[in-house]
Image: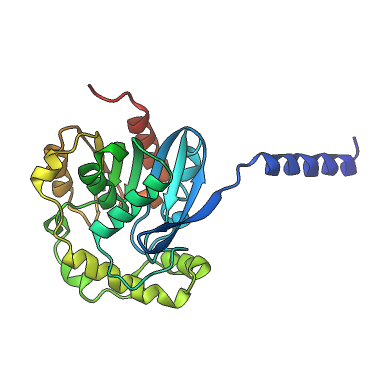
Amino acid sequence: MTMASIAAWRCLLAALLAFATPVLAGDYASVNGLKMYYEVEGKGRPLVLLQGGACTIEVCLGKLRPAFAKSWRTIAPELQGHGRTADIDRPLSMDQLTEDVAALLRQLKVRNADFFGFSIGGGIALRLAIKHPELVRKAVISGVQYSNDGLIPGLVDNLKTLKAEDMPPQFREAYARVAPDPSMFPVLVAKIGAMVLADKGVSPEEIKSIKAPILVMVGDADFVRPEHAMEMFRLLPHGNLAVVPLSTHFVPMEHPQWVGSMARAFLAAPAEK
């Protein structure tokens, strides 16, 4: 076989693999005044992937999603003002973001789904398990506080002066690539800071009411104190806890293999009776 024929076979194989690779189905839904962007990938039980603040699907979840999509139908929305979802004249609030996701899932006729939520996304998953238990079968929540007392000392004060340049460079660059108006990034960051400062959290009684199994995940150097994650784990009727070593708040991006392996094992295991 000549070098030319080998090259031709390689080109043919690459073309066949390209056709075999599933294409992401990105779309928009009208949700509570938003034109909310979301992507669907994979087949199987629905798994809702919820991003962190000021992040895009690709940056927050891109290293995790391919492995999830082998066994789940992943649904990844972008929240108000995030990524491809344009902002509207409305403050950000955890309760409103939660209702936006619930409304999207109702439009998609999704119930009894699994969830993986990072940071703000994890807070949304926690609230969905409280307010819309019919939507949540199991959830993994990473870097989530149920009250601001759970944050490391000094962080709340820093949020009062949070600026766009305080965000990781990859967050800023990803927003600039996909946002309808890239100049709105400083507005988004300011809204996120104001939201966290104003948030009242959820009560211990509400956490105790959650029927879905929840895996609480926290980095050992997270913005959320590991002791606080332990408190939440103790309150949950069906709680599980993972403290990930050598990790900051951004553990899903820092150690996607560890996080993905634990999350997949937890979500795939038979539900406790």
Position of residue 92 measured from the top left corner of the image (x, y, whole percent): 28, 66
x, y percent for residue 94: 24, 58
Q: Is residue 242 visible?
A: no
* Total numbered badges shown on the rendered structure: 0
Q: Residue 163 placed where, x, y %?
A: 31, 75
Give the residue at x 19% y 53%. Answer: 145
Could you say which is closer to the camera, residue 171 or residue 79? 79
Q: Is residue 241 above or below residue 173?
A: above
Residue at image coords 16%, 71%:
157
Locate the C terminus and report the quarter of the image it occupies.
top left
Toward which corner of the image does residue 87 lie, by quadrant? bottom left
Q: Is residue 246 left or right of residue 73?
A: left
Residue 41 seen in render: yes
Name the image quarter holding the N terminus: top right
| Farthest left residue in view | 205
Identity of the residue drawn at 47% across and 48% down? 63
Of residues 25 and 123, the one nearer the viewer is 25
- What's the residue at 45%, 42% (across, down)? 74
Q: Position of residue 223 (x, y in %)?
A: 23, 57
Q: Nearer the viewer, residue 104 or 203?
A: 104
Left or right: residue 173 compared with residue 23:
left
Colour mode of the rendering: rainbow
- Quarter of image, res 183: bottom left
